[in-house]
Image: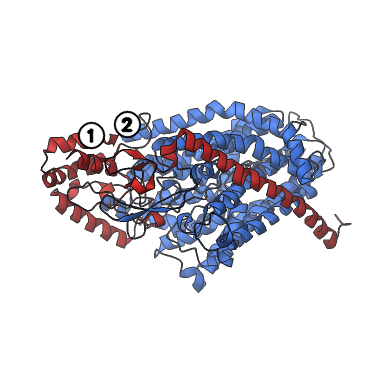
Chain colours: A blue, B red
Amino acid sequence: MSTPVLVAVAQVLVLLALLAAVHAPLGAYMARVYSSPKHLRAERLWYRLVRVDPDAEQRWTTYLMSLLGFSLVSVLFLYGMLRLQAYLPWSLGFTGFDPAGAWNTAVSFVTNTNWQWYSGEAAAGHLVQMAGLAVQNFVSAAVGMAVAIALVRGFARSGTDARVGNFWSDLTRGVTRILLPLSLVAAVLLMAGGVIQNLDPHTAITTVEGATQQSLGGPVASQEVIKELGTNGGGFFNANSGHPLENPTPFTNLVEIFLILLIPFTLPRTFGILVGDKRQGWAILGVMGGLALASLVLTTWAEMAGPGAAPQAAGAAMEGKETRFGLAGSALFAVATTATSTGAVNASHDSLTAPGGGLVLFNMLLGEIAPGGVGAGLYGMLVLAVVAVFIAGLMVGRTPEYLGKKIGRQEMTLVALYVLTTPALVLVGTAAAVVVEPGLVGIQESGPHGLSEVLYAFASAANNNGSAFGGLTSGTPFYEVTQGLAMLAGRFVPIALVLALAGRLASQTAVPATSGTLPTHRPLFAGMLATVAIIVVGLTFIPVLSLGPVVESLS
Amino acid sequence: MASTTVASDLAALTRHSLAGLRMLLVFTLLLGLAYPLAATAVGQVAFPWQADGSLVRSDGTHTTDRSEAVGSALVAQGFEGVEYFHPRPSAAGDGYDTSASAASNLGPLNPDLVATIEERKAAVAELEGVDPADVPADAVTASGSGLDPHISPEYAAIQVARVAEARGLSVADVEAAVAEHTAGRDLGVLGEPRVNVLELNLALDDAH
């Protein structure tokens, strides 16, 4: 193998070694966080302060109501903050967001999407970034984890009258015991690597040749870490993790990719522990890892081969990529950010090669399950596991079971609705945008790549990813409003269905495994699960993918 | 759920929203103020130069004072003089505009992009007196941020002769300066080798 290929492989091996080293301890720690009956003293004070009962076991309906209530006030609070920015301290002189823009951004950050129509350095002051956007980076991630844990409890519990946990306690612990401590440690690493962390305004300086350049300020490192760790993805600056002040070195690039993948790849361990069978976690992890690795190999190959007129003319697919990351470091980030629902970017996805751009789009269309967003990836994959046992059950003519729970008509109804929700949003949204004038005017590229831009935008919004084919002009009322609706429905409809499923499962009494039960921890089942994932997305999206990235790759 | 009505659902949602609001306010204090301020305190004490933006003076030394800085070691400037090494093309605003970091976002088959690349290649080849085939990819493509502070060692290599001539230096002297400001891969395997344009240019200014 040539040096670039060897280096690309070595870079992935370093990443895998780091993830493997923390997998078991962090997975076990998170299992303890969500199952320990004890509250820390500070937490008890916290609960008394906000007047919630952290010990009340909630039915799924109550759990959902708490989650929706919290998310509702989060949207309103953030919307108000963005609209009123001009009157807030640390606004750096920026005005408030207009109504459509504030709606889009508020929904975007509360739904863990972090789609951004604005440029941080030209629109958002420090207070909005810190106390508005970054707060949602934490709590929206903790909400995703809470829902995943509630579903896992549904499998693990037996005959509990649909009780799936306590939302307030899950939310608080996810933030204070997992996300915040990890963020503090990682922020120090990033600052050491050169990510800025100050409260200075952007200040004009005179460059060597006498030009004027703004020297940027801001609490970037603290926001950067939770942006990656919480699979949020909203950049402090427009160029996101391609910006040298957000991601200055190949080392910080590795740290950021590690943070993106850390919780999504570790939660299967937590799942295995909580359902009392670690092998179940290995099977889920295997499917996630296998799909992600396949995508990584293909994307890296595409970027390093550099097909297409522009990469061929330049000699390599370096348009939109930073020198310090190169082709392999950009491909690795692109896959990590789309295979999870992060959406941060360290390179322009619009300028990826046609097959590379198609692959990162496919990662999102897969439904953000390999490994997916924090929490959302695990519950998405578990829903597909139910589909897989259902199909297996049909083949042998037995009532399907997963982890001792019978999968009956009502469970399958919830699962089917889940599987249909995001594809419906993506396809209807894309179709609407390419037939109405306000949708068409935003498209930059002609031909198949133009369709890819729109498809990418709705795939990104409905799957709560947040990355973009940046050529699309999304800062228009049409895209701000429709994208906002897609993000909202793409987040909360699946969550409601998952919690309903969790409630039903928690009410059931577990049936003991017999010799006729399909083992769900073996490679056979893992292979089947991966196949189901690909077939479901394949059947749904092959027509539109054919008109977009596939045509483009063949031309 | 037959017994619940829309009205009682709304009442419940209101109750939960109020609890959510109290929780959000406390979270905002903890995560939105205490956490970033604590991180800022750590950064300002432990890594003041990095935390303030890796600013450099005209003699290449480090500073945290913006009034005496000529730039950031991490941020590209649009060097145009023949005596300077030139950075990569930039799509940030009108070029190297830190208020508008951006990539071109042009697609891989975009004919305008192909034409731009060909134009840049011809211009670089002429300026540096090399064959267009020897112009590396980073010299003709806009970076992801528009603020890429680095160029590849290959792009630096074709600029050496021009810079040496403009400054009346030997090619070997300039090559030595380039080598000094070339970083290898982090930990041997991460990222790509690269030359920091601002630091290199300041070193040349300072020495000669």
Q: Secondary structure at mark 2?
A: loop
User: In the image, are marks 1 and 2 on the same chain?
Assistant: no
Res A157 seen here: yes
Residue B85: x percent and y percent?
A: 22, 46
- Camera-side residue: B186 or A334? B186
> Which chain does tag 1 point to?
B
Marked residue chain, label 2? A
Q: Quadrant of residue B53?
A: top left
Position of B42 relative to A235 (above/below): above
Residue closer to the observer: A399 or A1: A1
Q: Give the residue displayed 80% in from the left and 35% down from the top.
A: A510
Query: How would you rate the neighbour count of disc 2 (Cα within 10 Å): few for under 14, some for 14-19, many for 20 or more?
Result: few
As shown in the figure, which amino acid type bears the numbered disc 2? Answer: Met
Instruction: Find the residue positioned furthest to the right.
Output: B3
Q: Mark 1 and mark 2 in contact? Answer it, CB < 8 Å.
A: no
Position of the C terminus of chain A by quadrant:
bottom left
Picture coordinates of residue A29 (x, y %)?
A: 65, 29
Residue at x 58%, y 61% (from the top left corner): A87
Q: Say whether residue A308 is left or right of residue A95.
A: left
Disc number lying in front (1 or 2): 1
- Look at the image and tell me whether residue A194 can be seen: no
Q: Which mark is residue A1?
A: 2
The secondary element bearing badge 1 is classed as: helix
Counting from the top left corner in percent of width and height, residue A341 is at: 55, 47
Kindly report the distance in space between the C-alpha atoms of the residues bearing marks 1 and 2: 27 Å
Amino acid residing under circle 1: Ala
Q: Nearer the viewer, residue B152 or A129?
A: A129
Q: Quadrant of the N terminus of chain A?
A: top left
The image's mark for residue B179 is 1
Q: In the visual, does B75 lie left or right of A526?
A: left
Residue A505, how many percent across, how many down?
A: 77, 41
